[in-house]
């Protein structure tokens, strides 16, 4: 018997806690872009459409981690894991080939939330990392070049600032938060495995 339950029904409700926070934060900041300095750069829908443009098909699934799995992810990632409920978005080509899997990670940087989309490639490496929303002053964001250096990295590469990833003056806490989120996503993806192939 599997330790996790996975549903691939696109109509599954309610949204997991981490996903609900992402939607709520993006919606609030979009309506009140100046509130608490929050900035939204892309909605989840826009980010998914950019990452997996048509004719790719995106399938949402929700997994519920057991206590053992939850602890295993935390230890592997060496980062906190707030929820045992994981929602991910797997993309498939017209031939059913797996194109990648997107995860949305919401976390606190200093005192405000940040929303990331992390896409894992079929080879288990990081395909892309995008900041969708940022509640801290934007001066604390690393430049896009720093995020580009995360691409292609894998779980075994030691994704810590000061090791595989460079320090960024003025954005230390932000880069550490992003690195922790990427380690968390890679650990979850490794545990759950690739999504099942989809028919044409």
Image: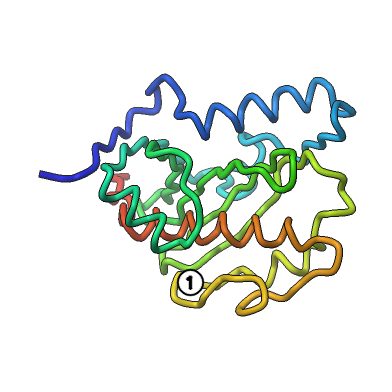
Give the vertical position of 156 relative to 96 (above or below): below
Counting the numbered discs, the total is 1
Q: Residue at x 33, y 28 (%)?
A: 9
Residue at image x 63%, y 47%?
116
Percent x, y of residue 98: 39, 55
For the point 63% across and 57% down, the residue is 129
**Image quadrant assignment for residue 162:** bottom right
Q: In this picture, is 171 found above or below 106?
A: below
| The N terminus lies in quadrant | top left
Q: In this view, does 39 lie above or below 163?
A: above
Q: Which colour scheme is used?
A: rainbow
In the rendered structure, the answer to whether residue 134 lies left or right of residue 78 reads right
Nearer to us in this view, 45 or 176:
176
Q: Which residue appears at 54% of the width and 27% of the height?
A: 20
Residue 13 percent coordinates (x, y):
40, 20
- In the rendered structure, the answer to whether residue 199 lies left or right of residue 23 reads left
Q: Position of residue 171 (x, y in %)?
A: 80, 61
In this orientation, which residue lies closer to the viewer: 164 or 100?
A: 164
- Is 181 situated above or below 42? below
- Label 1 Cα crowd, 10 Å radius (few <14 / some 14-19 / many 20+): many
Q: If the image is split into quadrants, where does the C terminus sit?
A: top left
| Callout 1: SS | loop
Could you tell me residue 149's position as x and y percent?
Answer: 67, 72
Write down the residue under mark 1: 154
**Quarter of the image holding residue 115?**
top right
């Amino acid at each position: 018997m599997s330790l996790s339950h996975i549903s691939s029904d696109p109509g599954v409700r309610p949204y997991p806690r981490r996903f609900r926070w992402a939607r709520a934060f993006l919606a609030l900041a979009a309506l009140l872009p100046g509130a608490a300095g929050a900035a939204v750069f892309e909605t989840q829908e826009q980010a998914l459409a950019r990452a997996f443009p048509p004719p790719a098909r995106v399938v949402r699934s929700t997994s519920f981690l057991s206590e053992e799995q939850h602890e295993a992810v935390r230890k592997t990632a060496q980062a906190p894991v707030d929820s045992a409920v994981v929602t991910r978005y797997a993309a498939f080509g017209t031939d059913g080939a797996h194109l990648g899997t997107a995860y949305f990670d919401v976390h606190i940087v200093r005192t405000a939330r940040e929303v990331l989309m992390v896409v894992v490639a079929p080879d288990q490496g990081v395909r892309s990392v995008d900041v969708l929303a940022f509640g801290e002053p934007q001066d604390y964001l690393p430049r896009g070049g720093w995020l580009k250096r995360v691409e292609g990295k894998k779980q075994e590469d030691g994704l810590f600032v000061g090791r595989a990833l460079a320090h960024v003056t003025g954005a230390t806490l932000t880069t550490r938060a992003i690195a922790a989120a990427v380690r968390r996503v890679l650990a979850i993806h490794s545990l759950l495995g690739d999504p099942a192939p989809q028919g044409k």
